């Protein structure tokens, strides 16, 4: 499924392992991630989960060809199962990010407890470019983390930004060289795993308590918009342009 699962004592590593496509995520990969998070949540031997890719790529986001073949039109779609599992994951979740982190590659970081990035990391939220809307409750969480104006700039313009800016605005905890990131993230995960699990669970639950219901509701609302917009002219033009390897032209489209 291009998701490698590795264990190091009480730390479980979920690794994007599709280097030939910069770890672009397919529906099957989303399903594997959802299942892996569910299993880790229930496994008493797992205390912390680390999500990572490679030194050159975290994830290029959705595999658009696969996405078009299997669009997520209802709540049971693998991508929505993954996002629900991510948002409700009760144990510490650590991300190690190098290279591109596009779309869901950035929005998933808003659900992680600790995020470490390589100097080569590039984040972007290109939903508007695709004629779509944000997902993963990022329309709620990003303004809460970085402030409304900064969130509007990232979501409305969709322009890429680097690891240093991601740290400055509060998405990333620390920036290191690409060769150091994963080792540092694993070391931090091991430190977390040495703490009492009951304290980790309670502390995380309390920190997220005020957002839990709002995140769930926002994901449902985003999903409604997303499913509707998939069939509209802007998304059709964006995806046609992608497949035809040309710039999209939205100038003749109305609202």
Image (tube, helix red, strand yellow):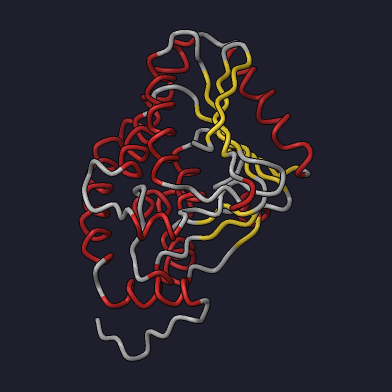
Which image quarter is the C terminus in?
A: bottom left
Is 167 placed above or below 152 here? Answer: above
Q: Residue at 73%, 50% (x, y): give it.
A: 119
Q: Residue at 50%, 53% (x, y): give it.
A: 61
Q: Is residue 58 left or right of residue 27?
A: right
Is 219 placed above or below 238 here? Answer: above
Residue 35 in picture, x, y percent from top left: 38, 28
Residue 27 in picture, x, y percent from top left: 39, 45
Q: Residue at 33%, 71% (x, y): give it.
A: 235
The answer to which quarter of the image holds residue 183 is top right
Is 123 placed above or below 76 here? Answer: below
Q: Nearer the viewer, residue 165 or 252?
A: 252
Q: Residue at 63%, 16% (x, y): give it.
A: 8
Q: Is residue 30 left or right of residue 230?
A: right
Question: What is the total number of numbered labels drawn onto the structure image?
Answer: 0
Q: Is residue 98 left or right of residue 88?
A: right
Residue 107 in picture, x, y percent from top left: 45, 49
Q: Nearer the viewer, residue 157 or 239?
A: 239
- Please, which residue is most extreme toward the bottom here? 252
């Amino acid at each position: 499924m291009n998701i490698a699962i590795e264990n190091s004592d009480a730390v479980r590593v979920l690794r994007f392992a599709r280097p030939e496509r910069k770890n672009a995520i397919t529906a099957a990969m989303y399903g594997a991630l959802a299942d892996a998070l569910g299993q880790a949540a229930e496994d008493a031997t797992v205390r912390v989960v680390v999500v990572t890719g490679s030194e050159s790529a975290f994830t290029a986001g959705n595999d658009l060809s696969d996405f078009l073949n299997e669009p997520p039109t209802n709540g049971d779609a693998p991508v929505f199962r993954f996002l629900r599992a991510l948002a409700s994951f009760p144990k510490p979740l650590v991300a190690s990010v190098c290279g591109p982190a596009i779309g869901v590659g950035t929005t998933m970081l808003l659900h992680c407890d600790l995020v470490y990035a390589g100097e080569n990391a590039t984040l972007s939220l290109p939903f508007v470019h695709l004629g779509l809307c944000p997902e993963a409750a990022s329309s709620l969480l990003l303004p809460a983390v970085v402030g409304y104006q900064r969130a509007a700039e990232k979501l409305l313009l969709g322009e890429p930004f680097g690891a240093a800016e991601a740290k400055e605005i509060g998405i990333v905890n620390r920036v290191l060289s690409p060769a150091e990131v994963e080792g540092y993230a694993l070391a931090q995960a091991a430190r977390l795993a040495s703490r009492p699990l009951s304290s980790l669970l309670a502390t995380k639950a309390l920190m997220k308590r005020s957002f839990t219901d709002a995140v769930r509701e926002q994901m449902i609302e985003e999903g409604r918009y997303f499913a509707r917009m998939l069939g509209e002219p802007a998304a059709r033009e964006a995806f046609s342009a992608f497949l035809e390897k040309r710039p999209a032209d939205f100038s003749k489209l109305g609202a």
